[in-house]
């Protein structure tokens, strides 16, 4: 059991009955031979109601779909859930060229004979891990059809010419999706019906403060608050279509603060973490102006005690 994460969730008021159910789950299931696949999240996910909903879905044996815009922490939540339940993780990053053989597996020549080489979905199903289906609405619907028997009441994988695999009781599937990204499409009804869906909101100011304080305890309070205001100002402009969502990059902001500790100037770090990820010159100028108005350039080390 992950004692530290349990303590954080208890302190945040996550339902005690659900946490007790997780304790029972982890006590009955061990994954010691696959311990290296149990993630170590970079930071906790904060959000009591989201935790309650996600834990209830997984304890009940359902699959989970996390939807929402950029910078909501969907992937961090996936890692935290796997750590809480102490389950190995297989990641599947979807793209338009994804096919069923990558997910389930395919024939391969081992030097002497043709053998079945299992894919990440097959391995998660076999060993009772969590399969994280990242950006599931990037793949073509026909490629995703192979998941129907995996995700519904049948819970089986039928590989022609090989075994029919019944899913391990602890196997779970957690999908994520963003709307509006280039290459995304509507998730078809047959697949969507196989998930419980959580709409993940953008991180609150209080929880963003907790994340920054946890990752950068030496960052002075006044500078931390300026970075938080910058993040939400960029988000507000993206919501009003003044800039694209590329600039609403929480990971980029945290990466920028990290290199400020090493002496990179504030402006250079923010350019690397946020501004330069936008490739339209006019948009870069708008974002740069927002940063200039909000934050004074200086050596990055001056921001820390």
Image: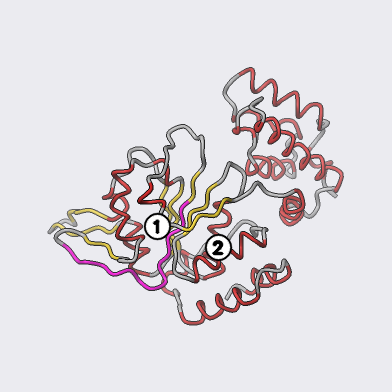
Within the image, what quadrant is residue 251 found in?
top right
Magenta run includes residue 289: no
Q: Nearer the viewer, residue 213 or 143?
A: 143
Q: Say few, some or many: other residues with alpha carbon within 10 Å of mark 2 (under 14 / 14 to 19 / 20 or more).
A: many
- Residue 30, x across and y down, in percent: 45, 77
Give the number of marks. Answer: 2
Residue on which the image places disc 2: 54
State which quarter of the image contains the N terminus: bottom right
Magenta run includes residue 164: yes
Q: Nearer the viewer, residue 169 or 91?
A: 169
Asked if disc 1 and disc 2 are in contact, CB closer than 8 Å, the reply is no
- Residue 152, x across and y down, in percent: 35, 62
Is 297 on the left-hand or right-hand side of 250? right
Instruction: Of the two numbered discs 1 and 2 on the same chain, state the one appearing first in sequence.
Output: 2
Q: Nearer the viewer, residue 302 or 205?
A: 205
- Residue 70, x across and y down, in percent: 58, 41
Picture layout, residue 146 above or below residue 186:
below
Within the image, what quadrant is residue 271 found in?
top right
Residue drawn 48% across the image and 54% down it: 65
Question: Which circle, 1 or 2, is nearer the viewer?
Answer: 1
- Residue 289, x across and y down, in percent: 75, 23
Classify mark 2: helix, strand or loop: helix
Residue on which the image places disc 1: 194
Q: Say few, some or many: other residues with alpha carbon within 10 Å of mark 1 (under 14 / 14 to 19 / 20 or more).
A: some
What colour scheme does the image use?
secondary structure
Residue drawn 47% across the image and 68% down it: 87
Residue drawn 38% across the image and 48% down it: 189
Q: CA distance from mark 1 to mark 2?
A: 15 Å
Picture layout, residue 15 above or below residue 290:
below
Classify mark 1: helix, strand or loop: loop
Which segment did they paint magenta?
162-175
Is 183 on the left-hand or right-hand side of 105? right
């Amino acid at each position: 059991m992950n004692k530290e994460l349990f303590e954080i969730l208890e302190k945040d008021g996550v339902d005690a009955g659900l946490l007790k159910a997780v304790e029972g789950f982890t006590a009955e299931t061990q994954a010691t031979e696959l311990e290296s696949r149990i993630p170590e999240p970079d930071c906790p996910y904060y959000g009591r109601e989201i935790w309650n909903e996600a834990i209830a879905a997984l304890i009940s044996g359902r699959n989970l779909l996390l939807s929402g815009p950029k910078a909501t922490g969907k992937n961090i939540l996936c890692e935290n859930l796997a750590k809480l339940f102490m389950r190995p993780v297989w990641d599947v990053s979807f793209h338009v060229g994804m096919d069923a053989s990558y997910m389930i597996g395919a024939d391969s020549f081992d030097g002497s004979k043709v053998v079945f080489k299992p894919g990440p979905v097959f391995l998660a199903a076999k060993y009772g891990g969590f399969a994280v289906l990242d950006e599931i609405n990037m793949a073509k619907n026909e490629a995703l059809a192979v998941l129907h028997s995996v995700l519904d009441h049948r819970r089986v994988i039928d590989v022609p010419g090989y075994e029919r695999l019944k899913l391990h009781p602890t196997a779970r599937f957690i999908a994520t999706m963003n709307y509006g990204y280039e290459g995304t499409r509507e998730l078809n009804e047959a697949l969507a019906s196989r998930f419980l869906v959580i709409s993940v909101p953008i991180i609150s100011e209080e929880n963003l403060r907790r994340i920054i304080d946890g990752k950068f305890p030496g960052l002075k309070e006044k500078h931390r608050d300026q970075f938080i205001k910058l993040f939400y100002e960029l988000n507000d402009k993206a919501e009003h279509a003044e800039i694209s969502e590329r600039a609403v990059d929480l990971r980029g902001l945290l990466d920028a603060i990290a290199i400020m500790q090493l002496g990179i100037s504030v402006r250079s770090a923010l350019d690397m973490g946020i501004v330069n990820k936008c490739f339209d010159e006019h948009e870069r100028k708008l974002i740069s102006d927002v940063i200039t108005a909000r934050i004074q350039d200086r050596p990055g080390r001056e921001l820390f005690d």
